């Protein structure tokens, strides 16, 4: 029926059944070792593309950087927007690699987030070169995880692949994304 409803039976309530909300948790290792061979610069290019995809898919982003002495949250589940570009351009590398504390913070944050938003579909992307001094066992994150290996040095240690195995994460090298372009 077109136009205004004339009878009570003409009124219908339709619940919206869209796709579940998406959250992309992105953890970036921005330690001094990622400056070698412009690994962080290549990663920033990929992140710009990912931010654009997140915007188009209306996904929310949570950003956590691991550099210096402690990880720092940059964003907590806000919508992707052009406001991320200045942060991305200013992202620099330096200091140590607090990646393990970053993963632990992410695990705790995801647990709290899951309680607040139980139907949210969460994906995690971890960007690292795997150049950690040492680590013990690492627990997997409670979501679908992809570890992107940023190691571009001529002699690769392959620690990122080992970390991906311990995280039960999918593994992909940074250069494989550039081959797709």
Image (spheres, rainbow, N blue to C red):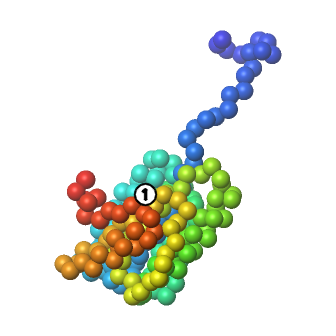
- Above or below: residue 181 compared with residue 38: above
Q: Residue 18, how many percent across, how many down? A: 58, 38
Residue at left offset 55%, top offset 75%: 104
Residue 116 sits above or below residue 137 on the image: above
Residue 164 relative to residue 114: left or right: left
Residue 17: name its quadrant. Answer: top right
Is residue 175 left or right of 135 when viewed as pictured?
left
The total number of labels drawn is: 1
Where residue 68 appears, as percent x and y from the top left, is: 46, 86
Coordinates of residue 93 in the picture (x, y in percent): 38, 81
Dot 1 alpha-carbon crowd within 10 angstroms: few under 14, some 14 to 19, many 20 or more: many
User: Residue at the spot x=46%, y=53% of the render?
Assistant: 54
Q: Is residue 82 above or below residue 137?
A: above
Whether residue 36 is visible, yes or no, is yes
Q: Residue furthest left?
A: 154
Residue under pointer 1: 51
Which residue does the image show at 41% across and 53% down from the upper left?
52
Is label 1 in a helix, a strand or a loop?
helix
Q: Residue at x 41, y 86 (%)?
A: 134
Residue 61 visible somewhere in the drawing: no
Q: Quadrant of the N terminus?
A: top right
The percent coordinates of residue 105 (x first, y second) are 57, 74
Q: Tell which of 63 and 85 is nearer to you.
A: 63
Of residue 135 and residue 83, the one placed in the foreground of this image is 135
Residue situated in front as seen by the camera: 21 or 2: 21
Residue 163 location, quadrant: bottom left
């Amino acid at each position: 029926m077109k136009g205004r409803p004339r009878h009570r039976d003409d009124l219908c309530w339709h619940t919206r059944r869209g796709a579940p909300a998406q959250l992309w948790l992105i953890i970036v290792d921005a330690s001094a070792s990622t400056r070698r061979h412009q690994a962080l610069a290549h990663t920033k290019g990929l992140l710009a593309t990912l931010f654009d995809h997140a915007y188009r898919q209306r996904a929310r982003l949570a950003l956590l950087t691991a550099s210096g002495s402690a990880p720092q949250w940059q964003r907590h589940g806000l919508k992707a927007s052009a406001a991320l570009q200045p942060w991305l351009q200013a992202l620099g590398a330096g200091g140590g690699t607090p990646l393990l504390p970053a993963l632990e913070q992410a695990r705790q944050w995801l647990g709290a987030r899951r309680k607040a938003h139980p139907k949210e579909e969460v994906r995690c992307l971890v960007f690292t070169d795997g150049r950690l001094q040492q680590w013990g066992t690492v627990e997997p994150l409670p979501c679908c995880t992809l570890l992107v290996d940023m190691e571009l040095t001529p002699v690769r240690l392959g620690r990122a692949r080992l970390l991906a195995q311990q995280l039960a994460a999918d593994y992909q090298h940074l250069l494989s994304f550039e081959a797709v372009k």
